[in-house]
Image (tube, rainbow, N blue to C red):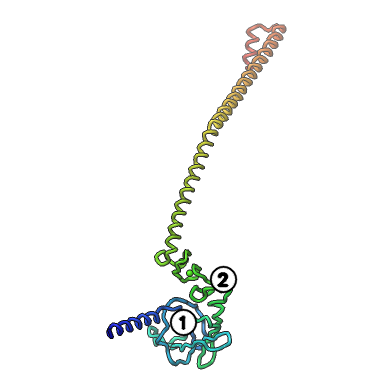
């Protein structure tokens, strides 16, 4: 009986321990720090993780997290050494640095200190959760659920089973996205069918229009051809008539000349000789 109780106690402690180490929202701050105490903020990441248990206990550089009343909420000692092993002689003027801590809704301002002198300040409340009901900046479902409710596009897959497909998730991790993708595919197939139907309908309309217009085009072409032929024929007739008139006029003039020559006692031989010379 004692061994059973002992086993149960160990089991409960084990479960409690598992619960204790369950991942929690972690906020990670990335910077570039320069030797001349210039600090360049890079970004804030938030994710589910575990608190760093190997934090430094002392350093010249510290990160202070203050609440809205300027009380210190959290403190991190930063491992700042301007030395890189894979660079010749190792000395560098700046180094990248990441500091992380469990996210805390009380945070308002973050100060970086070098030998107790503030070298950098950041209003992290504005960046991480400004409570304006708009999901933007570095806000996520983890750090600011009021501004970024489940399913928000915030760079974090929340995996909530809430009938909302989080656009940051892939289908394997958010079951809502499977249904979304399936409905999306079905919708796509339906749209494709509808498009095919519309194209077929349009094609039929075009063919019907061709059936109606083709005879009209042929009739118009035939009438045009007949008109051109008629005009050509009329022109030829007019030219022939003109030639005939000219010929008749020439014969008339020739007979007048002949009569005149006869009256002046020219014989036929002399008259023909004159006409031959005129031609
Ligand atoms: Ca916001
Ligand atoms: Ca999301
Ligand atoms: Ca979801």
How packed is label 2: few (under 14 Cα within 10 Å), some, or many (20 or more)? few
SS state under label 1: strand
Q: Residues within 10 Å of mark 1 (few under 14, many from 20)?
A: some
- Residue 151's spot in the image, x, y percent? 49, 67
Looking at the image, is 210 positioned above or below residue 27? above
Q: Is residue 24 above or below residue 164?
A: below
Q: Quadrant of the N terminus?
A: bottom left
**The C terminus, quarter of image:** top right
- Residue that mark 1 sits on: 102
Q: Is residue 199 above or below residue 36?
A: above
Residue 96 seen: no
Residue at x-position 49% and y-position 69%: 150
Residue 150's place in the image compared with 200, above or below, is: below
Is residue 99 rendered to the left or right of residue 221? Answer: left
Q: CA distance from mark 1 to mark 2?
A: 23 Å
Q: Nearer the viewer, residue 62 or 90?
A: 62
First in sequence: mark 1 or mark 2?
Answer: 1
Q: Which residue, as the protein is rendered here, is positioned at the far front?
A: 1
**Label 2 beta carbon less than 8 Å to ligand 1:** yes
Residue 134 lies, in percent from the top left, at: 56, 71
Q: Which residue is mark 2?
A: 134
Residue at 48% from the left image edge and 82% from the top image edge: 32
Q: Which residue is depicted at the point 70% across and 11% down?
A: 256
Circle 2 SS class:
loop
Q: How many marks?
A: 2
């Amino acid at each position: 009986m004692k061994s059973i109780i002992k086993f149960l106690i160990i089991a409960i402690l084990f479960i409690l321990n598992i619960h204790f180490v369950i991942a929690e929202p972690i906020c990670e701050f990335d910077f570039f720090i320069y030797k001349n105490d210039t600090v360049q903020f890079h970004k804030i990441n938030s994710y589910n993780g575990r608190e760093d248990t190997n934090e430094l206990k002392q350093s010249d550089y510290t990160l202070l997290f203050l609440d809205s009343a300027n009380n210190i909420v959290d403190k991190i000692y930063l491992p700042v050494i301007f030395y890189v092993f894979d660079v010749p002689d190792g000395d560098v003027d700046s180094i990248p640095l990441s500091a992380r801590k469990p996210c805390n809704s009380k945070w308002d301002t973050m100060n970086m200190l070098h030998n107790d002198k503030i070298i950098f300040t950041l209003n992290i409340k504005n960046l991480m959760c400004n409570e304006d009901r708009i999901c933007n900046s570095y806000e996520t479902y983890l750090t600011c659920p009021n501004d970024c409710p489940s399913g928000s596009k915030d760079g974090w897959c929340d995996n909530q089973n809430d009938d909302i497909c989080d656009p940051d998730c892939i289908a394997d991790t958010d079951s809502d996205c499977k249904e979304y993708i399936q409905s999306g595919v079905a919708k796509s197939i339906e749209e494709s069918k509808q498009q095919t139907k519309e194209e077929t309908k349009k094609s039929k309309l075009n063919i019907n229009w061709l059936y109606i217009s083709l005879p009209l085009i042929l009739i118009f072409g035939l009438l045009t051809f007949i008109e051109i032929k008629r005009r050509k024929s009329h022109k030829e007739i007019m030219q022939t008539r003109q030639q005939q008139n000219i010929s008749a006029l020439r014969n008339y003039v020739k007979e007048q000349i002949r009569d005149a020559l006869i009256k002046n006692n020219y014989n036929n031989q002399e008259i023909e000789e004159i006409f031959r010379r005129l031609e």
